[in-house]
Amino acid sequence: MKKLPEKYVERMKRLLGEQYPLYEAALSRPPTKGFRVNTKKISAEDFEGINVFGAERIPYVEDGFYLDYEDKIGNHPFHHAGMVYVQEPAAMAPAECIDIQPDWWVLDMCAAPGGKSSQIAGKLGEGSVLVSNKIIPSRCRILTGNVERLGLTNVITTCMDTERLAAEFPRTFDLIMVDAPCSGEGMFRKEEIAIDEWSEDNVRMCAERQAKILDNAVNALSNGGYIVYATCTFSLEENEMTVDGFLRRHPEFEIVPVCRDVERATVEGIYFEGCACESIGYARRFYPHIGRGEGQFMAVLHSTLDKQPRGELESKTVSADGRAERGKGKNRARKASTELSAGIISAARAFLSETLCSYKAENVTEYNGNPVYFPPLFKVKNGVAFSFGVNIGEVRKNYIQPHHQFFMAMGRDFKRRIELSPDSDELRRYLHGESFECDCEDGWAVVTVCGCSVGGVKVVSGTAKNHYPKGLRSLGGV
């Protein structure tokens, strides 16, 4: 590992005292890796029977395991099937800090690449909503790709700054995850570029940005809701000082203890000179010399305002660029749009009736001109979401061309299923983008491995014609 900046070493010696040599020694050891089972695809118990990636469980994550696998996991069929998500063990702790309820509406403000979002999604039920946001378009595409691979359903991805995000969804969410951009001190062992980018000026800049993000989170949180604030850094400025400053600005909030399993795996937050929060120890720190993972800070902030009954989120009539609709012909355009939307929904329902064993007709809607599958309880105007629920496909002249996400999210409901062995030649060929022979009636079918969908094919006269996306195809290892 690269040499640590002298200023950083001085700061860490003041922070850790006599424990600093243990921390320094930990940085010379290889980083610990982990993965989670995607319980939206397969239960942790069923996965244990086929698990080849590592059997030792992470004590504070119900579906988490330490990764012990020599080959590239991204080439494995189980990864293609969305059964697993590779994630650094300490980074799993923030989503375990609070007992997430299955009917919550949740916002992940800084979500890419999707680790915490997918972890949260595994805890949510059918009536829930998860909005996952990332301001950088390229990173939002990665986030959306992971949502698709994992077959997640009630998820919306967005690509905007947090101030606009709060304006679009005011007082909406039961829980907001703020995994804030930070100076990355906790990732020095894993990502050496963070060492090159570190400076005290950057620490201060990050702390200012984190305060603004937290203030925006307040505007999107419903009364009585929770904010989980997390960073992968050690600095007081970005952690305890940021939390203390937040509580000074927002006296309607309190810091509360984390769940017991996370508490056991971490050490308490640091009380610093001038700290007004007597309970700052409720915040938690994860160090590489104490736990098996990188650096992590987390704190649970609770709104003490009386919780109000949740009504349906109102959709404002706003165009895609955020300006209110105006001008002549608005009513005519709206009527034409309604008729087009109705046609898309009708075509999608007919397609689903032919393809699936069952589905909820009320969940079929239109977004940005495409048919999607999403429960009707949560409205989002066109142009706001990067992706919205399950993309069923593209409406063409007289048919629907299904999207890969449709196979991944709704594969268990398909009428036509082609189960392939993980080590079969047919699966290898499929993941390489080739067709293969099969015993299946004509029509759209889902390809599964160990019961989990990998993607789709169009069966014609005993030949499964490949519809696995080119960008996902495995060119080696499978």
Image: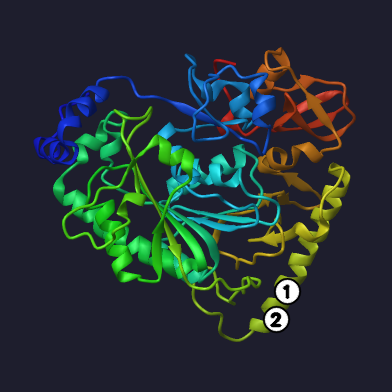
For the point 68% across and 35% down, which residue is it?
Answer: 41
Label 2 with label 1: CB-CB less than 8 Å: yes
Pick out the residue farthest to the bottom. 328
- The answer to whether 414 is drawn above or below residue 154 in the figure is above
Q: Position of residue 128 (x, y in %)?
A: 65, 56
- The answer to whether 86 is drawn above or below residue 69 in the figure is below
The amino acid at mark 1 is Ala
Coloration of the structure image: rainbow
Frontmost residue, 1 versus 253:
253
- The answer to whether 127 is drawn above or below residue 462 in the figure is below
Q: Say which residue label 1 marks.
A: 336
Pick out the residue farthest to the front. 278
For the point 20% across and 26% down, which residue is it?
Answer: 24
Mark 2 falls on what kind of element? helix
Q: Position of residue 351 (x, y in %)?
A: 83, 49
Label 1 environment density (alpha carbons within 10 Å; few <14, some 14–19, many ≥20): few
The amino acid at mark 2 is Arg
Q: Position of residue 6 (x, y in %)?
A: 9, 35
Residue 131's image quarter? bottom right
Q: Say which residue label 2 marks.
A: 332
- Image quadrant in which the C terminus is located: top right
Q: Which mark is residue 218?
A: none
For the point 70% across and 26% down, which residue is it?
Answer: 46
For the point 26% across and 32% down, which residue is it?
Answer: 188
Residue 105's image quarter? bottom right
Frontmost residue, 436 versus 75:
75
Residue 321 visible within the image: no
